[in-house]
Amino acid sequence: MCSLQCDFCHEPGGNFLEITFRTRQLERCYLYFQFAVRTFGDVVARKYIERVTIIKLSRSIDDLKKLSGLRCHQLTGDRAGQWAVNLTGFYRLIFTLEGERLEIARIEEVSKHYEN
């Protein structure tokens, strides 16, 4: 069950984002919890499945940006055109967005690039 307040998730009708997965592994991790646990560990697997479900129930990127727990933000620089949402303190889900089509690209560990 979603742990965030998703008022837009329960609105009837309307168009939702079309979700695709860049790799078969990412799709299998979403569809099969035990496969996700073996691949990423329990905590990241649970958050990944939860976040993709929230994305699937969203109508637009604006819906995702309204959910502060996701920390949905557009990446910049050489990552322009990509978006990220938090999974845990050290992992984030990276995706691309073209119109109504959102592609789950990868899960990445966040480096300590904020430290000097």
Image (cartoon, helix red, strand yellow):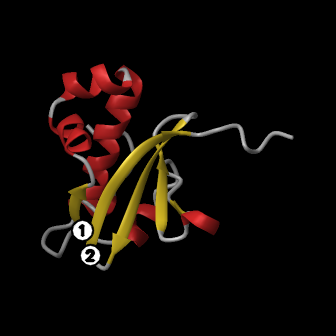
The quadrant of the rendering that contains the N terminus is: top left
* In the depicted structure, whether residue 113 falls above or below residue 19: above
Q: Amino acid at mark 1?
A: Leu
Instruction: Check disc 1 and report the residue beneath it.
Output: 17
Seen from the viewer's position, the closer of residues 101 and 5 is 101
> Quarter-wise, where is residue 61 in the image?
bottom left
> Quarter-wise, where is residue 73 in the image?
bottom right
In this rendering, position of residue 75 left or right of residue 36: right
Mark 2: give few (<14), some (14-19) or many (20+) Cα within 10 Å: some
Residue at the (76%, 44%) spot, across then down: 114
Instruction: Check disc 2 and report the residue beneath it.
Output: 100
Can residue 1 be seen here? The reply is yes
**Mark 1: which secondary structure?**
loop
Toward the right, the furthest residue is 116
Q: Amino acid at mark 2?
A: Glu
In this rendering, position of residue 114 left or right of residue 42: right
> Quarter-wise, where is residue 33 in the image?
top left
Residue at the (31%, 25%) spot, across then down: 39
The quadrant of the rendering that contains the C terminus is: top right
* In the depicted structure, whether residue 23 falls above or below residue 37: below
Spot occupied by residue 104 in the image (x, y as percentages of width and height): 32, 54
Label 1 close to label 2 by CB (< 8 Å): yes
Q: Distance of mark 1 from mark 2, alpha carbons?
A: 5 Å
Spot occupied by residue 90 in the image (x, y as percentages of width and height): 57, 34
